[in-house]
Image: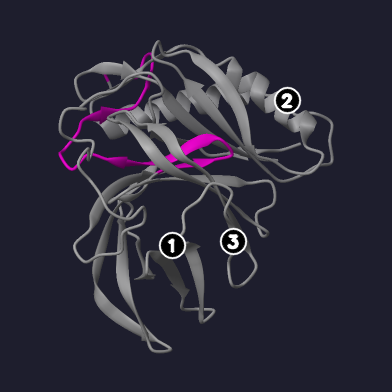
């Protein structure tokens, strides 16, 4: 069986906290999902990042006015979304479908459930006292919302909201995928494969590291005898010492257990890396996303 793979890096420490003093939005207050002009956030998103900015009333639909949110990604891509707030409840507008859906009710209570207007997304409030850890901050007293899509069976999204800021963290099937970054400039460095540390630029070092990971997979993967085809996404946690500490399946295919087991075995055997670092050159744990296409 042939396979292809691509590799994506993104950072989230589960053990080290940096820059706590004045960069963790300690004084933010207001709604869990604020919709206001001038609100700007910098977030990671998988192996990319984006800046979210709210602009003024820019769209009218059926007599209701929506704020425009512009998301500018590090890849150059720009996305636009539209939101409005009414008596504490937050609504989103799907321009393509021409429908409005409730994103967060005004009465925020544990156990509250709702569904999008098109019946695709379901939501449930899990907690009002959750915590969330990033490489820079430890947030507490967060609103935690679980959401699932009928079009993405088997994928569970968990969103974390802080009053006055909105979403500050997102997990996919229990694995971190996005988090808010401080307003100030921070220094992040990915983990590095031994032998790549002196290659010059960060891009050359990353290319070298990717190549070594790909080589390890090619040389060690033994494709099971299976007729199953599709995409399996693994999350590989590389700890503060640079060693693989955990490999979990984030996305899979029906009857793909044999493929999962082999992919997990190979990724668990990755050699030790120079660990990722953040801000003050302290090592942090890193999550490596590896999609396999069989």
Vertical side of 62 occupied by 133: above or below: above
Q: Which mark is residue 261?
A: 2
Image mark count: 3
Please say whether residue 197 is visible from this viewpoint: no
Residue 241 in picture, x, y percent from top left: 40, 10
Which residue shows up at 46% across the image and 54% down it? 108
Q: Residues within 10 Å of mark 2 (few under 14, many from 20)?
A: few
Q: Which of the pair 167/229 is nearer the observer?
A: 167
Q: Secondary structure at mark 3?
A: strand
Quarter holding the N terminus? top right
Q: Which residues are magenta?
A: 169-198
Q: Earlier in the sequence, mark 2 or mark 1?
A: 1
Q: Secondary structure at mark 2?
A: helix
Q: Which of the pair 121/42 is nearer the observer?
A: 121
Q: Which residue is mark 3?
A: 114
Quadrant for residue 217, please give it.
Answer: top right
Q: Earlier in the sequence, mark 1 or mark 3?
A: 1
Residue 73 in picture, x, y percent from top left: 32, 54
Please say whether residue 231 is visible from this viewpoint: yes
* Marks 2 and 3, how far apart at CA: 36 Å
């Amino acid at each position: 069986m042939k396979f292809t793979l691509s590799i994506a890096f993104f950072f989230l420490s589960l053990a080290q906290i940096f820059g706590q003093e004045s960069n963790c939005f300690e004084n933010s207050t207001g709604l869990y999902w604020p919709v206001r002009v001038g609100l700007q956030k910098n977030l990671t998103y998988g192996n990319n990042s984006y800046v979210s900015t709210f602009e003024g009333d820019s769209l009218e639909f059926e007599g209701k006015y929506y704020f425009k949110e512009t998301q500018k990604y590090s890849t150059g891509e720009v996305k636009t979304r539209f939101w409005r707030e009414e008596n504490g409840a937050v609504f989103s507008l799907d321009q393509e479908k021409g429908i409005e859906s409730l994103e967060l009710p005004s009465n925020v209570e544990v156990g509250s459930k709702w569904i999008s207007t098109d019946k695709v997304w379901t939501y449930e409030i899990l907690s009002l006292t959750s915590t969330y850890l990033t490489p820079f901050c430890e947030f507490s007293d967060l609103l935690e919302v679980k959401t699932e899509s009928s079009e993405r069976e088997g994928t569970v999204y968990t969103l974390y909201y802080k009053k006055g800021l909105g979403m500050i963290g997102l997990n996919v099937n229990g694995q971190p995928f996005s988090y808010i970054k401080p307003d100030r400039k921070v220094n992040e460095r990915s983990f590095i494969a031994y032998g790549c540390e002196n290659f010059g630029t960060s891009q050359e070092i990353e290319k070298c590291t990717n190549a070594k990971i790909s080589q390890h997979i090619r040389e060690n993967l033994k494709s099971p005898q299976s007729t199953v085809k599709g995409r399996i996404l693994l999350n590989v946690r590389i700890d503060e010492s640079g060693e693989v500490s955990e490999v979990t399946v984030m996305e899979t295919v029906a009857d793909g257990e044999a493929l999962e087991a082999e992919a997990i075995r190979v990724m668990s055997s990755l050699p030790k890396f120079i660990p990722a670092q953040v801000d003050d050159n302290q090592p942090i744990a890193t999550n490596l996303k590896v999609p396999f296409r069989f």
